[in-house]
Amino acid sequence: MKKKLIYICSPCRGNDGNYEHNIEMAQYYCRTVMHMFPNLLPIAPHVYFTQFLDDSDPCERRMGIVAGMELLEQCSEVWVFGMENPSAGMKKEIAKANELGIPIVDAAEALTIHSPAAASAAISASVSAAAPLLRTPELHPDISVNAVPFPDVADIEEQLRRNLMKQLVRSTEV
């Protein structure tokens, strides 16, 4: 079965300026979509292109943005994470999708949980999706990343439960 390619639209530099956090969140969004929607193939250009282009170099940043827009043209949908407060870059991606007639999906709506069973399944899938991020990698002693603290599994699971329960309550109020 051919999977539907979807564009993940989320902040890179963003309104908060927290580049590293935004990249980690985009990775998490892709992982969550892959676990919850096996027929979808998410692509987050700002995660991919920043692996080999320097986002702090204006020329290379522009190359990444242009390449991302070309990828957007190949996608069936654009899923927006942060529809309520999009960054300047996200606004450009949304405008491009509108121009091309590509459907725009509010990712928060697409991921809304409608039943307790679905909430439980989503929590399990999300925790499983996060598990690879939670293991401590074997790093070379000279790599400065060693100083970065890794998140606690229990904290992430609790945050996921709270978020999904909020969604469940919202969906039952309608």
Image (tube, rainbow, N blue to C red):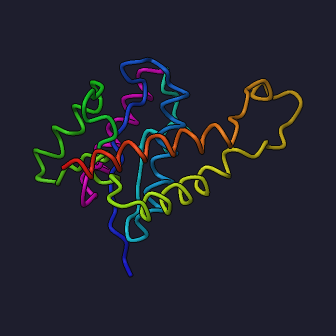
Q: Quadrant of residue 159?
A: top right
Q: How far across and down, in percent of the image, does residue 13 sit?
A: 42, 24
Q: How far across and down, in percent of the image, does residue 62 sit?
A: 36, 29
Asked if residue 73 is among those painted magenta in the image, a careful observer would answer: yes
Q: How far across and down, in percent of the image, does residue 142 sit?
A: 86, 27
Residue lying at 29% horizontally and 43% vertically, measured from the top left: 80
Asked if residue 154 is among those painted magenta in the image, a careful observer would answer: no
Q: Residue furthest right?
A: 141
| 153 over 3 or under it: above or below | above
Q: Quadrant of residue 16?
A: top left
| 24 over 55 or under it: above or below | below
Q: Quadrant of residue 93?
A: top left
Residue lying at 35% horizontally and 46% vertically, measured from the top left: 167
Residue lying at 68% horizontally and 35% vertically, measured from the top left: 151
Towards the viewer: 121 or 129: 121
- Tell me where the magenta segment starts and ends, as one range: 57-79
Towards the viewer: 110 or 39: 110
Q: Main secondary structure of the magenta part?
A: helix
